[in-house]
Amino acid sequence: MLVKKPDPRPPLNALLVDYWDAQLGVGLTSGAVSTWTGQKLGVVATAPGSQYEPYAPDVAFRRKPSLQTVESGALQLRNDNTGAAMAAAGSRPYTISAWHWIGAPIASLKTILMIGNIAAGGSNQFGHYVGVTNDVITCSYNGATAAATISGVGTKNHITEFWADGTNLNVRDNGVLAATASAVTLTSAGISWRDGSHPGNRAAVFHALFSAKPSDAYIAQLVNWIRERYL
């Protein structure tokens, strides 16, 4: 019996701003990733200088290539203050990422994803980020004025979500939810995004940004698509 392959693109949603998939829109230089282009809005993240992210088959993701960062260098793909605005001032965006550690988690901060108002040159005036320090996922808005955390990340695959709902900051990792009271919103238009920002052994295959949290039914559909495609 033939098994239907998952659609190469995720289920669409009116709130979807842009998404980055490791099998689509990847530009290579000497076999490593120098650009990564979003598949809806078309936002391009670019490697700084020659700090290209390794790109190789990943046994954790059905041997499909993933974008990898290494502990020896602060490799990152980024789009800082260029291109179309990605999140309006006063909004509460939602993000979802599929990733895992390569080897053991590291003690120092490793950012999985940043969305926000990141100044050209790299100052951390960001609006929305997902980071990991000492095996703890931390998600914050507006320069870490508040954070929701989940401990015990481990080396398994992760589907990590983050959103604010006007009452709490929420982080959900592989279905486990943590929340902390905070009604913050983005204080300025978010026009930047980064895949990673610090050295660390991390691999990623998917990020998506939504202007607000979609319905639970849609999120379940999207998570199922990610699992069918990569896990």
Image: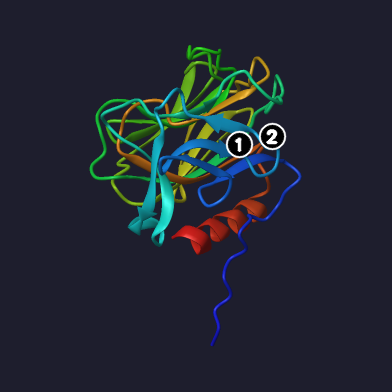
Which label is found at residue 30?
none
Q: Is residue 125 left or right of residue 105?
A: right
Q: Residue at position x 47%, y 28% from top?
A: 47
Which label is found at residue 94?
1
Query: Where does the image place residue 53, in percent across and percent down from the top left?
Result: 40, 36
Q: Residue furthest right?
A: 14
Query: Where does the image place residue 74, in percent across and percent down from the top left?
Result: 35, 25
Q: Is residue 97 left or right of residue 89?
A: left
For disc 1, the neighbor class at 10 Å (few under 14, some 14 to 19, many from 20) is: many
Whether 203 is drawn above or below 88: the answer is: below
Whether 34 is drawn above or below 145: the answer is: below
Q: Are marks 2 and 1 in contact (CB under 8 Å)?
A: yes
Query: Where does the image place residue 83, in percent across and percent down from the top left?
Result: 68, 24
Q: Quadrant of residue 103?
A: top left
Q: Residue at position x 47%, y 18% from top?
A: 144
Q: Amino acid at mark 2?
A: Ser
Q: Is residue 181 visible?
A: no
Counting residues from the start of the chain, the first of labels 2 and 1 encountered is 1
| Closest to the observer, 219 or 209 | 209
| Residue that mark 2 sits on | 211
| Closest to the observer, 44 or 216 | 44
Query: Where does the image place residue 126, in percent across and percent down from the top left?
Result: 54, 18
| Closest to the observer, 64 or 117 | 64
Q: Residue at position x 59%, y 56% from top?
A: 220
Dot 2: what SS?
Answer: loop
Dot 1: what SS?
Answer: strand
